[in-house]
Amino acid sequence: MIWGRALAVLCLMAIAGSALAQPKSDLWPRWAAHNEASTATIDHGPWQRWLDGHVRRGTDGVNRIPYKRVSQGAKAALASYLKTLEGVAISRFRHAEQMAYWINFYNALTVKVVLDHHPVVSILHIGISPGWFSAGPWGRKLVRVAGEQLSLDDMEHRILRPIWRDPRIHYAVNCASVGCPNLRRRVFTGARLEAMLDEAAGDYINSWHGAAFEDGELHVSSLYKWYAVDFGGAEAGVLNHLRRYAKGKLAEGLATATAIAGYRYDWDLNEVL
């Protein structure tokens, strides 16, 4: 029994370090349809009200949720919002509106998954994805849109990443972890999408979780290792990406930086402490 538990822990540690290196951007063509002539918008008001009532900024700068104190009514409201998103005929909307839809959908669904399995200390412990060596909930089909069953992985790696090819997507979607870019306290909308993506990128890169110099050496989030292909394909590309959004002392250090000394990521749940 002891050896079995030890093996399970070692497997989980290995997955935590490498699982996110595997998902590749793999277009699911049916979701590329859009209508740039459309002026219609999608109502994310219920999600905004949910965020207003539950997201709290910690002293460490991490936006957190008091999962154990979320009421049954609030859980029902979140489920209702997600059900509404399932019924949206998303191909009828313009690209910006679609992108905001998928980001909000992903984030709200992630919160629901954590609530459904709470208490957990990390989203990695929600082992509902198919496969012996899978961790977390990302591979499980959780919702249905336009007759297709979708997982969180589908939304991120088969829709968002391959359709928009925008590295800022990684700052917009949230994995309910301390090391992840913050769950934004404002919903994404097509009208404000560009500004919000830039804001999310700047906030993360200039936080300790994104990039920081320690004893003169640059340490960055493991996101830049797992998804290096989205950030330029190599360290030089990552450095150029960071320079675009860096401010203050970080910008000064990046001006002459030529290498990344280390990568890190905190998988602890983004729960109110």
Image (cartoon, rainbow, N blue to C red):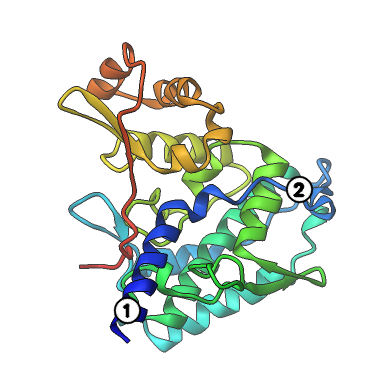
Q: Amino acid at mark 1?
A: Trp
* Chain-order first, disc 2 or disc 1: 1
Q: Amino acid at mark 2?
A: Leu
Residue linked to disc 1 = 3
Element type at mark 2: loop
Residue occupying image coordinates x 36% and y 16%: 258
Quadrant for residue 102, please give it: bottom right
Residue 44 - label: none
Residue occupying image coordinates x 56% and y 79%: 79
Q: Nearer the viewer, residue 245 or 124?
A: 124
Pinpoint residue 133: horizontal percent, then vertical percent.
53, 68
**Is residue 236 shown above or below 213?**
above
Comparing marks 2 and 1, which lies closer to the viewer? 1
Residue occupying image coordinates x 53% and y 40%: 227
Does residue 90 appear to the left or right of 21 in the view shown? right
* Residue 256 visible: yes
Residue linked to disc 2 = 27
Distance Cα–Cα, label 2 vs label 1: 41 Å
**Is residue 240 shown above or below 126?**
above
Q: Nearer the viewer, residue 51 or 147?
A: 147
The extreme top residue here reads: 256
Pinpoint residue 196: horizontal percent, then vertical percent.
49, 40
Quadrant for residue 1, please give it: bottom left
- Circles 2 and 1: CB atoms closer than 8 Å: no
Does residue 266 appear to the left or right of 238 in the view shown? left
Residue occupying image coordinates x 67% and y 73%: 143
The extreme front residue here reads: 3
Q: Residues within 10 Å of mark 2 (few under 14, many from 20)?
A: some
Q: Nearer the viewer, residue 101 or 6?
A: 6
Q: Quadrant of the C terminus?
A: bottom left
**Is residue 158 shown above or below 9?**
above
Q: Residues within 10 Å of mark 1 (few under 14, many from 20)?
A: few
